[in-house]
Amino acid sequence: MSYAIKFFVYSISLVCSINSHATSILKQEDDFHVAMVSPRGEQRLEVAFMDEFRILNKGRVRYTFIQPNVNNSAEMLGLPDKVRKLKPNLVFTFGTPTTLAIAGTTDNPIIDDIPIVFSPVSYPVRSGIISNKPNSKRLITGTSHIAPAEVHFEMMMKFKKFKSIGVAFNKTEPQTKFMLDDLHAMAKKFNVKLLTEEIDLDGNGAPDPRSIPTKIKNLQKKGAEWLYIGPDTFMGFTHRDLTTKSSIDVGIPSFTIGEHPIRYSYATFGVVSRLEELGKFTAFKAHQMLMKNNSAFIGSDTMYKYDILINKCALDALKISPSKDIEHLADYLTPENGGCKNL
């Protein structure tokens, strides 16, 4: 049975005042051109955004994709020039590293004369991408996908009681600092021990995926009862199979805040936003931004509907079962419904 955790928008941040230039963009006769900048390429969230934005704009939209390697510093530094050469009317950016590379921060903007919409960015205000001040003039908005960390801990406690939780993280991603801040606060609130392991860097200063199994094994040796997979692109997307399989190899379940590690990999349990819904919501935010006038403000919103997912293949591999408190709340991903892969 599908179950959604609903609460009033967790984070609504005043982003930008929209000028008359933005409104006129939607009225021009030429096709509306969107530069899609995503390290993942054209996947479910991006497709849902494109389909919905095309509907909202009466079909006169064309898309150009840029798929950067977020671990290539030179490539990321060159993104703004690459985007400008396309002369888009709107830029879509996926994730915190890509958004920071193109939009910059409120204190040090990079592209600030082309409207930008982002999704998902975990901590848009805390990372400096947007301002919570109503007099900000930037043409930028977007969406986040993460339930409050308190909800994560509550759901893990319902699944199985625990006294320690582990996280392996990539320190080169700016959002991991905020993830760790939240985890420290929640560990204190729930009276559990937080165990951390930092992913090694290679000779070029890039995170080294070869260190992932060792770091997760170290967490298990320290006593971690859960592996937490947060808004870390390196751990939760790029190397999600290695991350989630390493967790199973050492006998601990993994919790994810994103849909990819559980639906397409081997994470055990998650509280997630559906990617299609997030893509459509982001298209609505972009359209809303572009239709506003000088006196209007628009927020960057966090999705307030979440699904609880359990990966039956991971459960079987770990030989564990969730408590009765969580069973009736969750959707089970099984081989029969195409939701999980046997290990």
Image (spheres, rainbow, N blue to C red):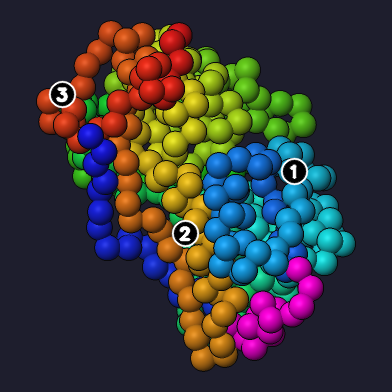
Q: Total label count?
A: 3
**Badge 2 density bin: few <14, some 14–19, many ≥20, Cα 10 Å:** many
Up-down: is 24 above or below 316?
below
The answer, for residue 142, to whether it is visible in the render is no
Residue at left offset 70%, top offset 33%: 206
In depth, the one of 104 and 244 nearer the eye is 244
- Locate residue 211: give its quadrant: top right
**Badge 1 density bin: few <14, some 14–19, many ≥20, Cα 10 Å:** some
What residue did someone put label 2 on? 281
- Please name the amino acid that badge 3 sits on: Ser
The residue segment tinted magenta is: 18-31
How far from the left and from the top, in percent, is residue 202? 71, 26
Residue at left offset 32%, top offset 63%: 9
Q: Secondary structure at mark 1?
A: loop
The mark closer to the camera, 1 or 2, is 2
Cα gap from disc 1 to disc 2, whole angstroms: 24 Å
* First along the sequence among labels 3 and 1: 1
How far from the left and from the top, in percent, is residue 304? 33, 56
- Locate residue 318: give its quadrant: top left
* First along the sequence among labels 2 and 3: 2
- Locate residue 208: give its quadrant: top right
What residue did someone put label 3 on? 323
The mark closer to the camera, 2 or 3, is 2
* Quarter of the image with the N terminus in it: top left
